[in-house]
Amino acid sequence: MAFYQISNEQISIQVDSMGAELKSLKKKDTDTEYMWEGDPAYWKRTSPVLFPLVGSLREGSFLLDGKRYPMGQHGFARDLEFRVKSEAANEIWFYLESDAQTLEKYPYAFLLELGYELQESTVIVKWKVTNPADGELYFSIGGHPAFCCPLQKGEEQEDYRIWFDVKEQVITGVIENGLMTAGQAAYPLEDGCLRVTEHLFDHDALVIEHGQVHKVALVKPDGTHYLTVSFDAPLFGVWSPPGKKAPFVCIEPWYGRCDAVDFAGTWQQREWGQCLSAGQCFEASYQISV
């Protein structure tokens, strides 16, 4: 495990090789930290990559070619050591390859690459998944970055808001015990904003599907947008641990999600899953601007 730091004139970031996890994002002129610190009293992680699974599996396992494979929530990449592929002044890339241990629990060969590029006051988080095998590769991938909310000590989280790039409402799925139900919930917005109330996440993450939104911001009590996440992902989650008044909010672009409560299909049939033919490469990214 090692920490790597890159910076430009406006921002600096720090990345842990364990999970290639973004641990710090600071503005240089104010020395303001935007990433959650990872206090295990609330949540021990900061910005894990979710691969090859986003969310939870029904019964904690998936079915592939007649065999069941156990897998915990959000997959295993976040708990593995990545190697550095390249490092420059404003960009760094890490990689993780399948091996005997991963093949036992996930029988697909893969190359996962995770990059961070700095452009002015923006971090571009980049993913590449390559299929080096002869057959198809099925997977999901997602981000789970946690941002300080409130940003300053002494402020109340309930005075903060979440802004979406739509005006009237967002429609979310409803999760029970980590699985997606058939229900939906509508959240009316005021000037595109949803207030961060104590009970907003009582039923787990707000899961917003079907490309409804592509830009989400955290908003200070004075109305200033202090952090914005932009993405092309077809769905995403907004989350903070329920019932803890945890001082952070996660904005999570996803290419995949948890199983439905009644899902009885195979790994290949999971909703929002990704598929690569032999030799193909999947590429996606999202941006964090401060």
Image (tube, rainbow, N blue to C red):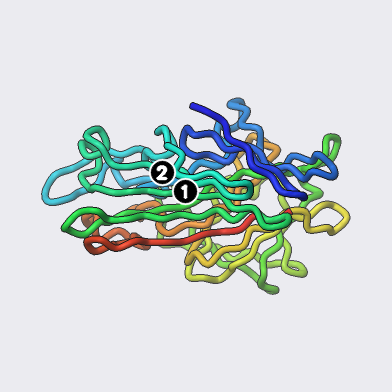
State left or right for residue 284 relative to residue 137: right
- The local secondary structure at tag 2 comes to strand
Image location (x, y in percent) of residue 114 = 47, 48
Which comes before the other along the chain, label 2 or label 1?
2
How crowded is the residue under tag 2: few (<14 C-alpha within 10 Å), some, or many (20+)? many
Q: Residue at x 84, y 42 (%)?
A: 30
- The local secondary structure at tag 1 comes to strand
Image location (x, y in percent) of residue 165 = 67, 70
In the rendered view, would you say 182 is above or below 52? below
Mark drawn on residue 159 = none
Between the C-alphas of marks 2 and 1, the distance is 6 Å
Image location (x, y in percent) of residue 226 = 77, 54
Q: Amino acid at mark 2?
A: Tyr
How crowded is the residue under tag 1: few (<14 C-alpha within 10 Å), some, or many (20+)? many
State left or right for residue 57 relative to residue 101: right
State left or right for residue 244 relative to residue 104: right
Per the image, the residue denoted by label 2 is: 95
Q: Quadrant of residue 223?
A: bottom right
Q: Residue at x 42, y 37 (%)?
A: 83
Q: Amino acid at mark 1?
A: Leu
Q: Residue at x 29, y 49 (%)?
A: 110
Contact flag, marks 2 and 1 (Cβ < 8 Å): yes
Per the image, the residue denoted by label 1 is: 114
Residue 262 can be seen, yes or no: no
Image location (x, y in percent) of residue 288 = 65, 55
User: In the image shown, does 282 or 41 lie closer to the viewer?
Assistant: 282
Residue 110 can be seen, yes or no: yes
Q: Quadrant of residue 272?
A: bottom left
